[in-house]
Image (cartoon, rainbow, N blue to C red):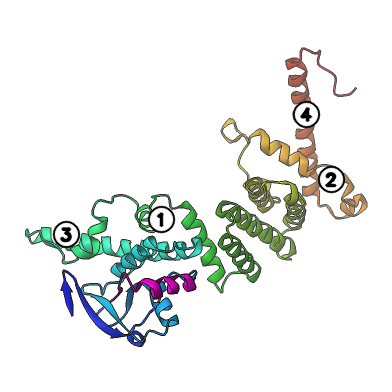
Amino acid sequence: MTISPGHIELERSIDSIRIGSRHRTDLGDIDMLAASIERQGLLQPITVTPDGTLVCGARRLAALRQLGVRRLNVWVRSGISEQLTLLLAEQEDNALHKSLSPTEAATLYREVKVLLAEDASRRQEASRFGAEQEKPRSDGAATVAAPFTALNGDTRAQAALFVTGRRSYTTLERIGELQRIAADESVDEALRSRARAELASIQDGGSVSSAHHRMNTHAAVLELERMAADPTQPAGIREASSTSATRVLAAAPLTPDADLERLAQEALARAKTATKSRKTRLAATADTKLPVRSFVYLWTDLSEWWLRYDIAEISAQLTDEQWEEFEEILAGTIAFAKRLRALRDTSRGMAPISASR
């Protein structure tokens, strides 16, 4: 038996070592590692907790089992019972050997983020208690939290720094959202299936950002299709939803992922307000003017609208109030068109053209 600060080296049966839950699922090329150990021996002992739970060395343990080793020397590390410390040790082992895949890193990030928040809350409570007692002292967890004493700010940035070595967490958050959707049984199966497909794409080296855009687009299109098929929705919303979903899907082959997501989100927003009562709309004041882009979208949606309705059916079914509203909108549209035409003619140095021509 060899003793060093924080460690004891003991001989142990390989079958007595428990792997437990770890974030790495792909151990990589074990054959090459086994051949190296067979030639040179085990240069760095495996580390376990006093109860035999593996801390560092999952790949070495797999290689030794492949070689038929029954007993081996291990480092027994004390003071590593807390879950955060186990994660620290596992990530240190990963950094020194085989890197985590993007999805493995996102899973580890999510757990570290929760543990860091819990640890910070516990420390804050201990600090508050110590201040109240006017006897500031350590809360007894310095060996666990020491690597993070210099970190400030968002827990997400701290967790990302721990997992990837960088403070940027956007990619990890996006993968985590896909993982959440894929695992949530309350979510529509079509959406869960798409999330699983995007995760597989990321695992194969695909772009996380593109997967994120595609997922958001898919969610928006599914919502449009749901609204289009919902008999409880007003006819205007159902029609707008169906038309918008078709347009987004038609644009998909030639539109970049980010642009398609934006198109889908804007289409969904317009469809949801397609038949809002005029009484509930904001008055058209200078403070509520819409952008030119909205004007273009509106008239694009209205393109050849008169060809899509049965005029006889509308004439028979419109109420007097609905007809009055139509005439009011038509009159306002014609007046707006006259002013717009005059301004365009003036800006081009042309004499105003009569609307009757």
Which quarter shows the N terminus?
A: bottom left
Judge by depth and name the residue closer to the eye, 105 or 75: 75
Q: CA distance from mark 1 to mark 2?
A: 54 Å
**Which residue is label 1 attached to?**
164
Q: Label 4 amino acid?
A: Ala
Residue neighbourhood size for the residue with mark 3, other residues' Cα within 10 Å, grouped as few (<14), some (14–19), many (≥20): few
Judge by depth and name the residue closer to the eye, 141 or 12: 12
Residue neighbourhood size for the residue with mark 2, other residues' Cα within 10 Å, grouped as few (<14), some (14–19), many (≥20): few
Is tag 1's residue or tag 3's residue first in the polypeptide sequence? 3
Q: Which residues are magenta?
A: 30-49
**Which residue is label 3 attached to?**
128
Report the residue at 51% width, 66% height from top: 180
Q: Are marks 2 and 3 in contact (CB under 8 Å)?
A: no
Is tag 4's residue or tag 1's residue first in the polypeptide sequence? 1
Q: CA distance from mark 2 to mark 3?
A: 67 Å
Q: Are marks 1 and 2 in contact (CB under 8 Å)?
A: no
Q: Label 2 amino acid?
A: Trp
Q: Is residue 138 above or below residue 261?
A: below
**Which residue is label 4 attached to?**
337
Which one is closest to the eye, mark 2 or mark 3? 3
**Residue 257 at x, y percent in the picture:** 65, 49
Q: Is residue 33 magenta?
A: yes
Q: CA distance from mark 1 to mark 3?
A: 32 Å
Q: CA distance from mark 4 to mark 1?
A: 57 Å
Residue neighbourhood size for the residue with mark 4, other residues' Cα within 10 Å, grouped as few (<14), some (14–19), many (≥20): few
| Residue located farthest toward the front when viewing the structure as drawn | 39
**Residue 61 at x, y percent in the picture:** 39, 77
Report the residue at 82% width, 42% height from top: 303
